[in-house]
Amino acid sequence: MAPARRKWWIAPAVLILLVLGYLAAGYWLVPRVLRSQAVGWTHDRLHKRLALGEIRFDPLRFTLDIDSIAVDDPTHPMVALGHLHLKMAPLSVFEKAWHLPEVGLDRPAVDAIVRRDGSLNLAELIPPSTGEATKPLALRIDRLTIAGGQVAFADLSLPLQPRSRLEPVTFTLKDLRTSASGSGDFTFAAASDAGERFDWRGRLSLTPLGSTGSFAVADLRADTLYRYLSPWLPVIPTSGKASAAGRYAVRYAGGATRLGVDVARLGLADVGLDGGTLFRGSAHAGKMDLGHGRIDLAIGSDHALGSLTGLAQGAVLNDVRVDGPDKTQALHLAEARLDEARLDYGARRMMLGALHLSGLEVPLRRSAGGAFNLARLMPPYTPVAAKASRVKADGEAQATPSWYVHLADFALTNGAVLWEDHAVGPTVRMKVTGIDLASGNLDTDMVRPLDLRFAMRINGAARLSGEGTVAPRTGAGQVRFDLAGFQVGPVLPYLPSLPGLVLRSGKVGAKGVVTLAQGWSPAGVRFVGDASLDGVALHEAGTDAPLVAWNGLALSGLRYAPSGVDIAGARLNGAVGRIAIMADRTFNFSPLVSGATPAATPAAKSDAAKSEGQVVAVAAPSPVAHAVSPSPVSSSPALPIRLHDLALQGGTLNFADYSISPSFEARIDALHGHVRNITNSGGALAAIDLQGQVNDRYSPVTLSGTMDPFHYDRASDVQVAFSNIELPMFNPYSGVYAGYSIAKGKLSTRFTYHIANRALQAEHHVIVDQLQWGQASANKARVSWPVRLATALLKDSHGVIRLDVPVRGTLDDPTFRLGPIIWKIIGNVITKAVTAPFRFLGSLFAGAEKAQFVDFAPGSAQLPDTAGESLTALGKGLADRPALNLDIPAGPGLAGDAKVLADRKMNAALMVKPIRKGQPVDFAALAPADQEKRLKALFKQSFHQNPDFAGLAPEAKGDDGHKARVTGEIDWLRDHLRKGFMPGPADLEALGRARGTAIRDALVTKGGIDPIRLFLSTSTSGEEKDGTVRFELKLR
């Protein structure tokens, strides 16, 4: 028993020794073994130097603590750890998996570098494979923590050689198992030196490898991404931060990987981009938010992409601005909103829901050289790159099917286009604002028709709206639109120039349906609807004086097709035209007419020359036939146009003449009526029916007939009539050209023009009623023709002047001008009337022209027998021309009258002595011998002496000589005695009055003329004419 009692201590001693050995091994041996093995393994397998600080192993608590662990690179530590703490479960040695209740990593540091050759330095920490299959380590970790860590990463293979640092990095992992059913929860948090934050929470399983959880990224800088992605990004981020949050699930099994990501939130803020190689300029976005999104990715065991699908909902992009290279704004978008997007990479389909753009503003500018500002955003063209892109695109197109993209709905609200064009003069500036555009069913196939709806305002006043459908691929479609109030002023530089004209105002409107045919060909465009052009004002360029204007022009039933334009009706309201003769006697529209009239083939002289001076009541002579050449008419104009009915209302034509002083102004207003069947196709005649008034409603004007408005010289039959126009309105003209103002009177005219193949027949019927001249003007002395006489000659018994002016001719005569011919004819009529008034009356009353002269026998007041008929005709003429007065000479007799009167008195004295029975009682009837006896007796009685004939020629022989001697003595005696019997002035005056009275009495008794119109002029005598005394009557 004693030996047994003596050996009881051995077991405790052994146990104590074992414990002490265990403790000694744990406290002293284990750290040394671990250091030796770790350093050696690192050196042998990794060819690296491992630096270890203090190693502490607690065999009682089964904890291992190692300080200052570092794996050195040649220049600095590659991996470092401030402190490693492991707590092991002792019983796990008897289990199938190692159990670590605690694993702590304090202040870990990783310096990862991708070298210039693309190799990763951390790859050197992976030991070379031995070729032997190893069984995965069974491991269970209850809690793994990382605190105060930092990760540095640099990629020297990239152009920008980016470097990043995450610090501090914290990580917590709970219940990690490498068994099939094992998984662990973890938490990861890190922040970069730029303030970027990363949070990751989830569950990790190693068998199979997978993880689920949530993530959050905050303040991720755009330039950080760019430094790593610059080789693959065409743009350069200059500012911006990103934030994201969501959940994920990833699983790797059987060599295949599946990833699912639910993005609860994705946001970008203050994103700035430099165009880089994508465009020249810069872009900036204030904010982008993605409310919800999901991505599902599957990669097969062959590492090929199996499937990729995506869903995004509620994406919003705010305040996007694109600037050109000169920092001027090229585009601004207030907001873009996409409610849904679905991606199926395998099917190569992207289905977009509703895209809404709000506040899109695009400034469009064209420089003086014709370059557009948006074109400056395009990158420089490089032929090599372009060819490479085409080759790559062609290769991809052959290898893979094309993508299909569908947009269910598109809407643009409150858009704006600011147009500025410096390539034209003056510079065009237009603002298209309030643009609303909506469409649906947009896709890359472009087969199905698009539904379009649009509305906008142009320059703040015009409105354009419409809707319709268009098939993008074929171009077929139909669009209904409504344009109202578009001012044409801003777009004038794009319209054909109007020489000498300035368009001051004008508004265009249109409403209808545009139909597009397949093929996008202009030949397939059709339009049906209405149009308007209102508020038009055309001014002269030099003086800015108004020329043509109208309030409204409305076209209804307008049909356009490439084959022609057909207009059912047009209504022109408030049209105003202005014709003016300027101070230099040119027309205001003369600068608008460029070029002279083309020379025509000379033709026979116009019949107008033959009709000069005709104021007739008989038919004009028939026109002479001419071989005329009518102007050619194109049977097929480039664009046939037909207007069925043009209605005019409230039109006005103003006329002014500034070439005289005072100036003359008149107007034709209240112009209304219709012009029907207007066309530029040859052969059709337009029917004209217009009415108006001159100055007031009491002076109507009418224009009627038919004509070919585009080829008037082929067929025209037009009548123009003016009625009851007050003549005093023409005082500016009468004062200058007639020398008198017009006190009263009225004018009515009727003009008829008939043109057939350039042959003209014109009739001009002019009626002047009750013309009465007023006071003389300052120009009276300059007027050479007797105005009042001409008026009196032309007036009939009712105070009416009628002029019929027929004109015949051909428009092929280069000298033929209708206006000058008319005035020449009227001028000839007036000239002939005032220069030969009796001949003029004779043309009206046969024989009146002979009454201009009344030939009296010398010494006699007896009217000749031929004067009776002519004075009767003159009386009729004066009766029909009540404004005419007649001046009748009644002046003293002439020398011939005095001789006759003296001889008559002398003959009476010679017959005082009684005559013998059988002798004649008239002295002239006595025989020459008896005459001589009585003459000698009277001579001796008068002179108390016998006559002395010594001065006479000697008597010739024979009877003839004796007779001649007697005749000579008689003449000598009468000549000497006559002086004693010459009549006195009173006798001659009495003779003149008697003659004038005889003429007056004949006109009163035979012509029925009021004697108040007949004036005896004692200051006017006759003249000796062919042995008579001629009295010339004068009309006034």
Image (cartoon, rainbow, N blue to C red):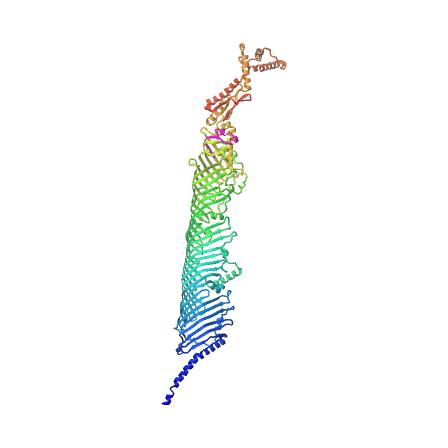
Q: Nearer the viewer, residue 618 or 238?
A: 238
Task: Locate residue 260: give its quadrant.
Answer: bottom left
Farthest residue, direction left: 1
Q: Nearer the viewer, residue 103 or 660?
A: 103
Q: Percent x, y for residue 131?
A: 47, 76
The total number of labels drawn is 0
Q: Percent x, y for residue 220?
A: 45, 64
Region of the chain picked out in magenta, as a range: 764-792
The stretch drawn in magenta includes residue 787: yes
**Residue 130 visible in the snapshot:** no
Residue at the image position 47 percent from the left and 57 percent from the top = 322
1000 to 696, vertically: above or below: above
Task: Locate residue 942: give its quadrant.
Answer: top right
Q: Percent x, y for residue 289?
A: 42, 60
Q: Nearer the viewer, residue 932 or 311?
A: 311
968 relative to 507 in the view: left or right: right
The stretch drawn in magenta includes residue 113: no
Q: Which image quadrant: the N terminus?
A: bottom left
409 to 770, vertically: above or below: below
**Residue 655 visible in the snapshot:** yes
Q: Percent x, y for residue 508?
A: 44, 47
